[in-house]
Amino acid sequence: MLNTDKPPGLIRRLAVIVYDAFLLIAVLFFATIILLPFQQGNAFEPSSWLYSLYLLLVSFLFYAWFWTRGGQTLGLLAWKLRVVNENGLPISWQQAALRFASAWISWGLLGLGLMWMLVNKDRLMWHDLISKTRLVWKRPA
């Protein structure tokens, strides 16, 4: 039986990331397919900052929409977790933006921001701390 009083651990959080990554890849493929008719038969250039910015925006909208609408992506739903603010309420779009941007920093520094939860007494990662959000267990309705 799960201890729902204790914040989720690193393995569970990494499992959520893997689940969400699979769905996000599918969303990014679809987002790319939408743009193909406007490419006039040309491939996307690997160095295209505009295309990269577009995919980053799609990624943000993917996560932010789920986080602000019930607090659960597919991965969070599968692992019975949700994202909430410090009061246990759904997060705002501003918090979602901070969470998304700071998660990039957490990953970009060799995952140091993710591993921070191993030394934080509340098991919070950098993006939790910066956005004033947290993962909690989804209570049965």
Image (spheres, rainbow, N blue to C red):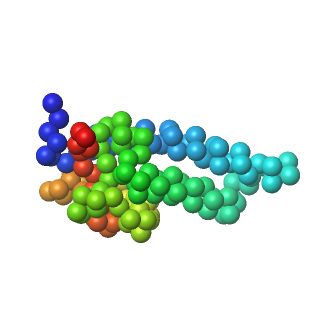
| Quadrant in the rendering for residue 120 | bottom left
Q: Quadrant of the C terminus?
A: top left
Q: Going 42% across and 40% down the picture, which residue do you hit? A: 74
Location of residue 47 in the rendering, given as x and y in whole percent from the top left corner? 69, 59
| Quadrant in the rendering for residue 131 | bottom left
Q: Going 17% across and 56% down the picture, which residue do you hit? A: 122
Q: Is residue 9 visible?
A: no
Location of residue 78 in the rendering, given as x and y in whole percent from the top left corner? 36, 36
Location of residue 97 in the rendering, given as x and y in whole percent from the top left corner? 44, 65
Determine whether, in the image, residue 118 is placed left or right of residue 12. left
Q: Quadrant of the N terminus?
A: top left
Q: Is residue 106 visible?
A: yes
Instruction: In this rendered view, identify the residue nearer to me: 132 or 122.
Output: 132
Instruction: In this rendered view, identify the residue nearer to me: 13 or 2.
Output: 2
| Quadrant in the rendering for residue 10 | top left
Determine whether, in the image, residue 85 is placed left or right of residue 38. left
Q: Going 43% across and 65% down the picture, which residue do you hit? A: 93
Q: Going 38% across and 47% down the picture, which residue do you hit? A: 72
Location of residue 56 in the rendering, given as x and y in whole percent from the top left corner? 56, 58
